[in-house]
């Protein structure tokens, strides 16, 4: 099975990923208040993330710019996928309501 979140393996150990997953399962959500997302990173992990972020934002050519773009993109893709799955589970039909699909004018 292909790893769905390769960026996580660069940031967290397997044990940390399991702890984060267990903690995320315990978050209480409701439709009125939405969802709460918590990101926990060590200082070194924050430095790595900021390093890659600035490489993607600077106009200075850097040899590892592609790697940095992939790092940030993987993180954002996984985060957006998580949000979409949350909406599908907690607010079924959200797209129809949000975009007004099926509503009479």
Image (cartoon, rainbow, N blue to C red):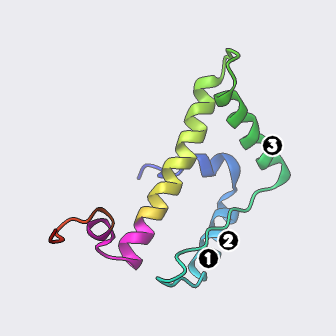
Q: Main secondary structure of the magenta part?
A: helix
Residue placed furthest toward the front: 105
- Residue shown at 33% from the left, 70% from the top: 94
The residue labelled by disc 2 is 19
Q: Which residues are magenta?
A: 85-97
In the image, residue 19 sits, relative to residue 71, either above or below, namely below
Q: Is residue 87 left or right of residue 62?
A: left
How far apart are the alpha carbons under marks 1 and 3? 25 Å
Q: Earlier in the sequence, mark 2 or mark 3?
A: 2
- Residue shown at 37% from the left, 77% from the top: 91
Q: Quadrant of residue 104?
A: bottom left
Q: Earlier in the sequence, mark 1 or mark 3?
A: 1
The crowd level at tag 2 (other Cα within 10 Å; few <14, some 14-19, many 20+) is: few
The crowd level at tag 3 (other Cα within 10 Å; few <14, some 14-19, many 20+) is: few
Q: Position of residue 31 (x, y in %)?
A: 46, 82
**Residue 22: which disc?**
1
How far apart are the alpha carbons under marks 2 and 3? 22 Å
* 12 vs 70, nearest the viewer: 70
Q: Are marks 2 and 1 in contact (CB under 8 Å)?
A: yes
For the image, the number of numbered tags is 3
Q: Quadrant of residue 48?
A: top right
Q: Are marks 1 and 3 in contact (CB under 8 Å)?
A: no
Q: Is residue 2 left or right of residue 15?
A: left
Q: Secondary structure at mark 2?
A: helix
- Residue shown at 61% from the left, 68% from the top: 37
How far apart are the alpha carbons under marks 2 and 1? 5 Å
The residue labelled by disc 3 is 47
Q: Nearer the viewer, mark 2 or mark 3?
A: 3
Q: Is residue 94 magenta?
A: yes
The quadrant of the image that shows the C terminus is bottom left
- Residue shown at 52% from the left, 76% from the top: 34
């Amino acid at each position: 099975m292909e790893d769905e979140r390769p960026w996580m393996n660069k940031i967290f150990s397997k044990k940390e990923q399991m702890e984060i997953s267990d903690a995320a399962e315990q978050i209480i959500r409701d439709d009125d208040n939405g969802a709460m997302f918590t990101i926990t990173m060590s200082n070194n992990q924050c430095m790595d993330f900021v390093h890659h972020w600035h490489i993607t934002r600077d106009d200075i050519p850097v040899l590892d710019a592609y790697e940095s773009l992939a790092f940030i993109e993987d993180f954002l893709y996984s985060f957006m996928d998580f949000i979409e799955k949350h909406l599908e589970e907690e607010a079924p039909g959200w797209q129809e309501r949000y975009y007004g699909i099926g509503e009479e004018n």
